[in-house]
Amino acid sequence: MNTKLIESLAQVILSLSEEEQNLLYLKINLAKPSPSTQSELLNLNNRLKSFESQYQMSSENFYQRFRVGELGDSIDFFEWSVFYEMWNAAQNQSEFMETKN
């Protein structure tokens, strides 16, 4: 552990105004996935698995085929595509946050 760095950071944080400390606190907490976010990701994953089971194809394969118009325009497919986009965006954000930390 780099104790000199930690001590320097502590001094900088203590020298911040209350507004700056609040902003720092907000930024740190936004970088962590909250339990509700994890719950939402699990819910999205479960929904995707349900569609995958029903239609016997992976969500990735479905999405590629749906985007080029191979599968038609069933309401299920539109719903599946939205869940896949939401899941994909959440995964990308999660990976981005992990690389930043």
Image (cartoon, helix red, strand yellow):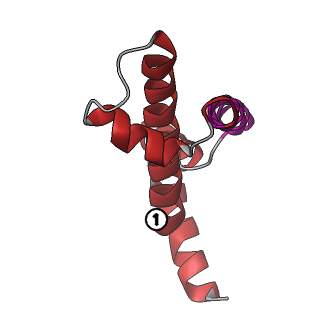
- In the displayed structure image, the side of residue 19 where residue 36 appears, left or right: right
Instruction: Name the residue nearer the viewer: 97 or 55.
Output: 55
Quadrant containing the N terminus in the rendered view: bottom right
Above or below residue 78? Residue 4 is below
The residue positioned 52% from the left and 49% from the top of the image is 91
Q: Label 1 sits on what residue type?
A: Lys
Local SS, label 1 = helix
Magenta stretch: residue 54 in it? no
Question: Is there any visible trace of residue 17 in the rendered image?
Answer: no
Magenta stretch: residue 46 in it? yes
Residue 73 location, quadrant: top left
Instruction: Name the residue nearer the viewer: 29 or 20.
Output: 29
Instruction: Name the residue nearer the viewer: 3 or 83.
Output: 83
**Image coordinates for residue 76, horizontal then vertical, percent:** 52, 16
The residue positioned 32% from the left and 33% from the top of the image is 70
Q: What residue does disc 1 label? A: 100
**Image coordinates for residue 52, horizontal then vertical, percent:** 63, 37
The residue positioned 58% from the left and 67% from the top of the image is 10
Above or below residue 2? Residue 77 is above
Quick one: label 1, few (<14), some, or many (20+) residues within 10 Å?
A: few
- In the displayed structure image, the side of residue 20 where residue 98 appears, left or right: right
Question: Is there any visible trace of residue 97 in the rendered image?
Answer: yes
**Image coordinates for residue 12, horizontal then vertical, percent:** 47, 64
Which span is picked out in magenta?
34-52
- In the displayed structure image, the side of residue 6 where residue 34 appears, left or right: right
Residue farthest to the left?
A: 68
Prevailing secondary structure of the magenta residues = helix
